[in-house]
Every structure is written in structure tokens, then in C-alpha cells.
Amino acid sequence: MRDFTLCNLVFDNDGFFDSFPQIAVRATEGCATYDTQGKELEIRGSADFTTYLNALSIGKWRKYASVGNACLHLCVKGAAFDLYATRVYADYPEVFRGPKPLVHVDGQEEWHDVDVVIPTTDDAHIVSFAIESSDEQSVFKTVSEKDAGRLQSAEYHDDDVFCKI
């Protein structure tokens, strides 16, 4: 596995995305709001990160850099949630969500890291993820390079790429 950042999630809008909030994250049920004070994304319900800014163009990475799976790193606290893989194919503009969650994350009061492999084994051109939580709040924060921990809980392969998100 090569440990470098391919992309970072973008939800820090500082007012820039106010006119087009779905360019970064789409609240499919409930709400997803950004707290500028704490620099945290608060999600109640369901949110999809398969957006212009937060989806990974795995088709191009696979073609030009021989990338395997993408490894997602999140820093979270609050309510429990399920994380689903999403994908988009070149010949079909719909977002497909996996039938089962990749991982269930138990609720915790303290910040903790979650590392998940986003499988890229088929011919999808874009991959990302979606969150489903209860009506209680799950909170996500940005993690700087120096604060990001090493991979902890998932199984990785030599051609996987680590994404700190």
C-alpha cells in the first residue's frame, strides 16, 4: 500500500458554496450543515458525497497510475451511522449505492478515526460514499496531514491507495 493522499473531502465552504451547497455534499434525507466555528460537518439523516468535489475519479487513477482500492479515513463523533460505497458508470448517469453498508460505526462522544476500504473492483469511473445516520447528529471534521493517524482497522493490499479524508 502506498500511503499518500489522493484527495480530501471538501465541506469547508466559508460561504462559498451557499448558493450551490450540493456541489460538496447532498443531504438526501434530513440535513447536512457546516459549522464554520468548529470546522465540522454535522449530518442528521442521510448524506451522499458522490458530488462534483467529493467523488474520486477512480477510472482515471486506475488507467494512468495503476491504482487499486481507495482507502477512506474519517474523523467522527456523535450518533452511529452506516457507510455505503457509491459508484457512477460512464454510460449511466445515476449514482449506484451498494446494497449493504461497508461498515457500521457505533456512536461515540469522543472523536475517533474510521478507516474503510472503498472497493473499486468493477468498471465504475467514479467512486465515493454515502452516510446514513439516525435523527441524532453525527459530526465529521477535517483532519490535517500532521493530525491524521495511520490506518487502523481495515485490511489493505499493495496496490491500494490511502485517502485521508
Image: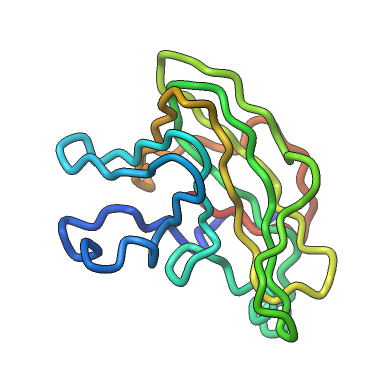
- 89 or 7: which is nearer to us? 89
- Residue located 55% across and 54% down the image: 163
| Viewport quadrant of the N terminus | bottom right
What number of labels is visible? 0
Specify how the rendered protein is coloured: rainbow
| Residue 38 higher or lower than 9, as above or below | above
| Residue 84 higher or lower than 82, as above or below | below
| Residue 51 higher or lower than 109, as above or below | below
| Residue 73 higher or lower than 10, as above or below | above
Q: Residue 36's quadrant in the figure?
A: top left
Which residue appears farthest toward the front when viewing the image?
A: 29
Point out residue 48 in the picture as x, y percentages from the top left corner.
Answer: 53, 53
Relative to 18, 26 lies left or right: right
Which residue appears farthest toward the top when viewing the image?
A: 109
- Residue located 73% across and 59% down the image: 69
- Residue located 47% across and 62% down the image: 54
Point out residue 57 in the picture as x, y percentages from the top left corner.
Answer: 60, 74
Point out residue 141 in the picture as x, y percentages from the top left corner.
Answer: 36, 38
Relative to 115, 15 lies left or right: left
Point out residue 44 in the picture as x, y percentages from the top left corner.
Answer: 43, 33
- Residue located 41% across and 37% down the image: 43
Q: Residue 73's quadrant in the figure?
A: top right
- 50 or 76: which is nearer to us? 50
Relative to 165, 86 lies left or right: right
Relative to 21, 13 lies left or right: left
